Image (tube, rainbow, N blue to C red):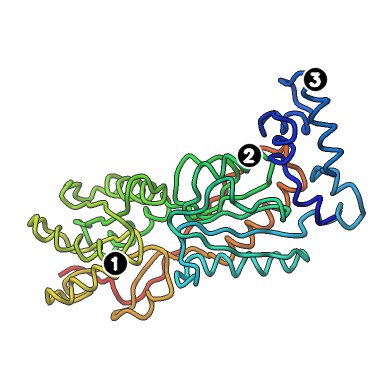
Amino acid sequence: MERRLKIGLKDIAEQTGVSSAAVSLVLNNRPGVSSETRRKVHDVAKRLGYQSRQARRAGGGAGLANPLRSVGFYAFGVNAALGHSYYGDILSGASASARDLGARLSFEAFDSGGPNADELPIHAVDGLLLTGRPPRECVMRLQREDVPYVLVCCSLAHLPGDTIGPENVESSYRAISYLAGLGHKRIAYLGGEPVNIDARERYLGYRWAIEDLGLDTDPGLTLSSYFDVEHGECGLRQLLDQAVEFTAVYAASDYLAMGVYNSARDLAIKIPRDLSVCGFDNNSLSETLHPALTTMSLDRDRVGRLAIRRLAEVVADPSQQSIHTRLPAELVERQSCTRPD
């Protein structure tokens, strides 16, 4: 049985001399392939002992009740030690949900370079959760080889498949509404790189709130860079160098907010007396800052649990349409924001 789990579409494609895409069409009984190719694929699949996920699920009562027995959780561009609590919390929720289903979860982190798409281990599990910045070619291989997967808080846009993550637009809108409710009219924005879907959506929420609430729309109030401490430090200094006036900063990640804190301390700017700061993510360090950071918090444990449940649904019925699940973040009010003088 273990050997069958490891036989994939690529193995059959190599034996038949046709593409993995053609093998997938044959094994899923779809049109577009000649009868001769169909015969070759079926013969090789039988000889190798290949068994589709649908067939494995139908093979026994226990499998039919719960088809998800093994899960791979792959993090791309994320520290292997998971010092970044954002992904650690997701993993914790996914692990708990997998245990509830009686499934085994294995975790692997890849550095920023990531594995070659052909080297990604995908056939020893029933389905995959992908987080971070998975290479597009890896995702496309999963599609070609009919491997169920769910994209969890992936920051890259235009990746196909089921997704689950934060509702960035609405959440950013709420952050700006909160600052406006305190009396701030000139709110600066520090965000991430435009290719990052979270950064794009959080900026959109900021812009909509600024316009809807009639706040100042000075283009000099917005900067986009990367979601890290260094760019938060540089960002605050650049805003000040541009001689724009602002009483609050919305940092679209807590790491940017930490950078703002560092530069504010060096420049003798008191938070929140001189400058209010609101972040996004509620990472493990935000509460330890002085003063503690007001931020938008996503229930990442719940994200992990919902991702496992959705993966189980995809494994049970691979033919269903993809679903995009977005969870709103909640404001965690601490001591970094106050009314402007």
Residue 279 marker = none
Q: Residue at x 39, y 48 (%)?
A: 196
- Left/right placement of residue 241 relative to residue 61 reads left
Say whether disc 3 or disc 2 marks the residue closer to the N-terminus.
3
Query: Three-letter amino acid code at disc 2?
Result: Gln
Estimate how packed mark 3 is, as few (under 14), some (14 to 19) or many (20 or more) residues with alpha carbons within 10 Å. few
| Contact flag, marks 2 and 1 (Cβ < 8 Å) | no
Q: Quadrant of the C terminus?
A: bottom left
Using the image as rendered, state which of residue 207 and residue 280 is in the foreground: 280
Residue at coordinates 22% horizontally, 52% vertically from top-left? Answer: 223
Amino acid type, mark 1: Val
Residue 172 picture quarter: bottom left
- Residue occupied by mark 2: 143
Q: Going from the N terminus, do you reach mark 1 or mark 3 first?
A: 3
- Circle 2: element type: helix
Q: Is label 1 in a helix, a strand or a loop?
A: helix
Task: Say above or below: 332 vs 63.
Answer: below
Do tag 3 and tag 2 residues touch (Cβ < 8 Å)? no
Look at the picture and state if 321 lies above or below 173. Answer: above
Q: Which residue is mark 3?
A: 36
**Nearer mark to the viewer, of 1 and 3:** 3
Per the model, the C-alpha gap separating discs 3 and 2 is 24 Å
Front-most of residues 213 and 68? 68
Which of the marked residues, 2 or 1, is nearer the chain's N terminus?
2
Q: Which circle, 3 or 2, is nearer the viewer?
A: 3
Q: How far apart are labels 2 and 1 at the CA level? A: 36 Å
The residue at which mark 1 appears reads as 229
Which quadrant, please, contains the N terminus? bottom right
- Residue 314: % across, % down: 71, 46
